[in-house]
Amino acid sequence: MPHIVIHLSGEPDAALAREAVATVGELTQRVLGKKPEVIATTVQFIPAALWFIGGRSLAEQQRSAFHLDISITDETNTKAEKARYLAEVHAAFARLRPDLHEVSYVHVIDARAAAYGYGGRTQEYRHQAAGV
């Protein structure tokens, strides 16, 4: 039940957004074991002239970047799975954006089950209702 926010440098590009969502969705399912039907993703584009790394805009550096936040329920993935996810997401974006700046971040947010959910129910509620 992850919620994913992807920030991409550059001008809005529907094809790139769709490809990024598909790629991240596949990795989220395969590496983190999340169900595709509950993966919610938003994509935002930020002009390269307004994205700064080391005090210089990406436009000046002629580079691209991304930032990905993914909220998952705490204690549902191991450190090794999260480390693999970070590595695979970065590699995937490097393939999508050949001019990718190394300082592109992935943030896995471990949210407490009692403080996170969808459809008006917490993940803690779902866990207890499942009798696990």
Image: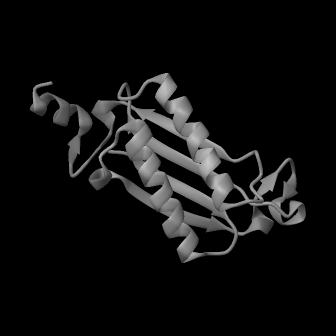
Report the side of 58 relative to 33 (left or right): right
Q: Nearer the viewer, residue 70 or 25?
A: 25
Quadrant (top left/top right/bottom left/bottom right) for the C terminus: top left
Question: Which color scheme does this rendered protein use?
Answer: one colour
Q: Position of residue 84 (x, y in %)?
A: 54, 33
Report the side of 122 relative to 32 (left or right): left
Vertical relation: 16 (above or below) 120: below
Quadrant (top left/top right/bottom left/bottom right) for the N terminus: top left
Residue plotted at (59% across, 43% down): 106
Residue plotted at (53% across, 68% down): 17
Q: Nearer the viewer, residue 88 or 119?
A: 88
Q: Nearer the viewer, residue 47 or 97?
A: 97
Q: Position of residue 58 (x, y in %)?
A: 81, 60
Residue plotted at (10% across, 33% down): 129
Q: Position of residue 13 (x, y in %)?
A: 59, 75
Vertical relation: 24 (above or below) 44: above
Q: Position of residue 104 (x, y in %)?
A: 69, 47
Q: Nearer the viewer, residue 41 or 100?
A: 100
